[in-house]
Image (cartoon, rainbow, N blue to C red):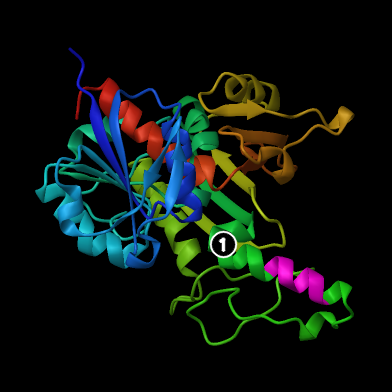
Amino acid sequence: MSKSYTIAVAGATGAVGTKIVELLEGANLPITKVKALASKRSVGKTIPFKNTEIIVEELTADAFSGVDIAIFSAGGSLSEKFAPEAVKHGAVVIDNTSHFRMDENVPLVVPEVNPESLREHQGIIANPNCSTIQMMVALEPIRQAFGLEKIIVSTYQAVSGSGARGIAELENQVKEYIDGTPLKELTAEILPAGGDKKHYPIAFNALPQIDVFGEDGYTLEEWKMMNETKKIMSDDSIKVAATCVRIPVVSGHSESIYIEVEKETSVKELQELLAQAPGVVLQDDPSQQLYPQAINSIDDKATFVGRIRRDLDNPKGFHLWVVSDNLLKGAAWNSIQIAEKMHELELL
């Protein structure tokens, strides 16, 4: 008889957590029970699940008793504190924060790319950064077929990546502007980074800063993309550079990606390859103005790829435009896929 799982969602009342609970309804997993865990102030609230409602419980170490799978999306400090506790209680942890991603003992997994890494887990599996995930889904088929020497990516990231407060800040600034407030005087308290010294309007603007800057001039978001890519692809020789920009879009991250391949290929071959790649939807017909758009990615689990073209100065260089819903494939859906793959590989 197939095992049935008790699944806990830590951070269940947040933007990603609610998506995880919603997606569990249709997950390819035998589920006995779903536990919704959050901070003390959320205890007693209810979250719909199938034909009933789940009552939110407080996130504590003892809350993981009897849990088989614990999906965390409650912030890095809480993952640091409670993920090991969940493992002690016998759960496998799938963590959405950045806390464990570069730990050499923790697999960093995109199921379409490196599912076999799941076999190496020691209780905790890390979900990559949202902008990294969609890039990996698009580029791994190319790497497998033609090799990859260099990746240069510029991201155009939605405010939902900074949480519900980021969305609210954008909406409030738009209202202020409509009511007559000059653009430079819009109220900014969160973006580009809540923990940094200054804040700037995101409405009608583009902010070339996501998270705080390091001494090397790169932001933490850029550092994540560059280093996570090498870990997921198990290849430190790939040259990776990233520039991450926040734009006034509610949901859906977009990326302009330049790659250099090892073996010569053509635009047509890349299009044919990606049209068959798992998790990818090819939208690439400039004659019909068909290309991926953030607004069309919302509530879709796919990674959309288009605008594939050869670089005019390098026959092995190509440009792509990649778009995905950052709350789905970039977070909640990738977590569910990891759980499904763990079940499929009988690792639970």
Q: Quadrant of the N terminus?
A: top left
Residue 117: x %, y % from top left: 27, 35
Q: Residue at x 64, y 56 (%)?
A: 158
Q: Residue at x 19, y 28 (%)?
A: 347
Query: For mark 1, what is the residue?
Result: 164
Give the magenta-colored segment's residue range.
Answer: 170-176
Residue 133: x %, y % from top left: 48, 44
Residue 105 at least partly seen: no
Residue 272 at least partly seen: yes
Closer-to-camera residue (18/244): 18
Closer-to-camera residue (287/197): 197
On the picture, is 142 further left or further right than 125? right
On the picture, is 305 further left or further right than 196? right
Q: Mark 1 is on which residue type?
A: Ala
Query: Tag 1's secondary structure?
Result: helix
Q: Can you tell which quarter of the image residue 338 is in?
A: top left
Q: Residue at x 62, y 26 (%)?
A: 270
On the picture, is 259 further left or further right than 216? right
Main secondary-structure element of the magenta-colored stretch: helix
Residue at the far top: name it: 1
Residue 317: x %, y % from top left: 63, 41
Q: Quadrant of the C terminus?
A: top left
171 part of magenta stretch: yes
5 part of magenta stretch: no
Q: Can you tell which quarter of the image residue 273 is in?
A: top right
Q: Residue at x 29, y 21 (%)?
A: 344
